[in-house]
Image (spheres, grey):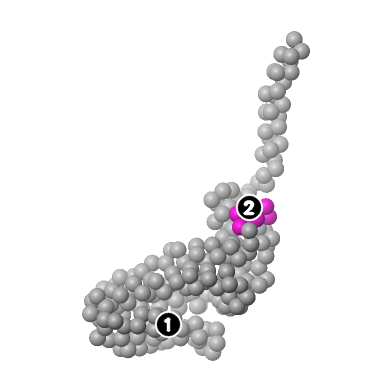
């Protein structure tokens, strides 16, 4: 009799404990994939606001509305978290196909102008450049992910221009890519001049003339 009573109580005890386990989770917190994406978005948002050096894992957790343990379980360091955040930022980059090399390059430059017009971009870029000087991991990620994604998109446009006969065969692709990106970056962070349509169209025209057949 006593044994039967003990056995019959166990399910009731387990059922009573279930709500307590649920109560550990804070209401409104994102979970699984949603939490993962929220953390990555929070990292980029905070880099834009405070820069890379001032960024902390705790601040990211707070911004993403998740527990600190949730962040540390997924990423062992700030570098690895920021690395994935940057890769995610560039993942949706599309390669335009307007029918002409000039049209494609100007379309990509229009996207670039939009990025530079974002008030948060200065803190993001300046923070990343400073971080690259101190962290080889960040330098590798920025060059191999953030920058490489855009350069690869531009490379496809240039290669298509060669196939169309609008650009000469054997052109120095790396030089052309530097010419397409360098002036915008230099003016934005160094001279402080406007990154406007006049600048970007001038860059595109210079590249088209300089590498014409």
**Left of 78 or right of it: where is 93?**
left
**Left of 96 or right of it: where is 123?**
right
Question: Which residue is label 1 attached to?
Answer: 178
Could you tell me how far apart the alpha carbons at marks 2 and 1 are, in whole angstroms?
39 Å
Q: Residue at x 69, y 40 (%)?
A: 23
Q: Quadrant of residue 168?
A: bottom left
What x and y, as percent, mark residue 34? 55, 51
- Element on which disc 2 rests: helix
The boundaries of the magenta stretch are: 68-75
Instruction: Give neighbour class at mark 1: few <14, some 14-19, many 20+ (Cα, 10 Å).
Output: few
Q: Residue 69 in magenta?
A: yes
What x and y, as percent, mark residue 39? 59, 58
First in sequence: mark 2 vs mark 1: 2
Q: Is residue 79 above or below residue 178?
A: above
- Element on which disc 1 rests: helix
Q: Residue 2 in magenta?
A: no
Q: Residue at x 72, y 20 (%)?
A: 9
Using the image as rendered, state which of residue 133 and residue 36 is in the foreground: 133
Residue found farthest to the top: 1
Q: Is residue 127 visible?
A: no
Q: Is residue 20 above or below residue 96?
A: above
Question: Which residue is label 2 attached to?
Answer: 73
């Amino acid at each position: 009799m006593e044994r039967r009573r003990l056995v019959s109580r166990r399910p009731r005890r387990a059922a009573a404990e279930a709500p307590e386990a649920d109560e550990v989770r804070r209401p409104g917190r994102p979970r699984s994939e949603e939490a993962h994406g929220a953390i990555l978005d929070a990292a980029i948002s905070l880099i834009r606001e405070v820069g890379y050096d001032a960024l902390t894992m705790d601040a990211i957790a707070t911004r993403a509305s998740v527990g600190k343990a949730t962040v540390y379980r997924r990423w062992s360091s700030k570098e690895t978290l920021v690395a994935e955040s940057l890769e995610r930022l560039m993942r949706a980059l599309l390669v335009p196909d307007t029918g002409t090399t000039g049209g494609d390059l100007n379309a990509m430059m229009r996207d670039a102008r939009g990025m530079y017009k974002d008030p948060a971009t200065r803190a993001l870029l300046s923070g990343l450049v400073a971080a690259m000087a101190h962290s080889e991991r960040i330098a590798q990620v920025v060059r191999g992910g953030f920058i490489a994604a855009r350069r690869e998109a531009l490379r496809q446009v240039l290669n298509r221009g060669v196939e169309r006969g609008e650009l000469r065969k054997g052109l120095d692709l790396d030089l052309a890519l530097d010419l397409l990106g360098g002036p915008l970056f230099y003016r934005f962070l160094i001279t402080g001049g406007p990154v406007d349509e006049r600048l970007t169209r001038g860059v595109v025209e210079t590249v088209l003339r300089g590498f014409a057949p």
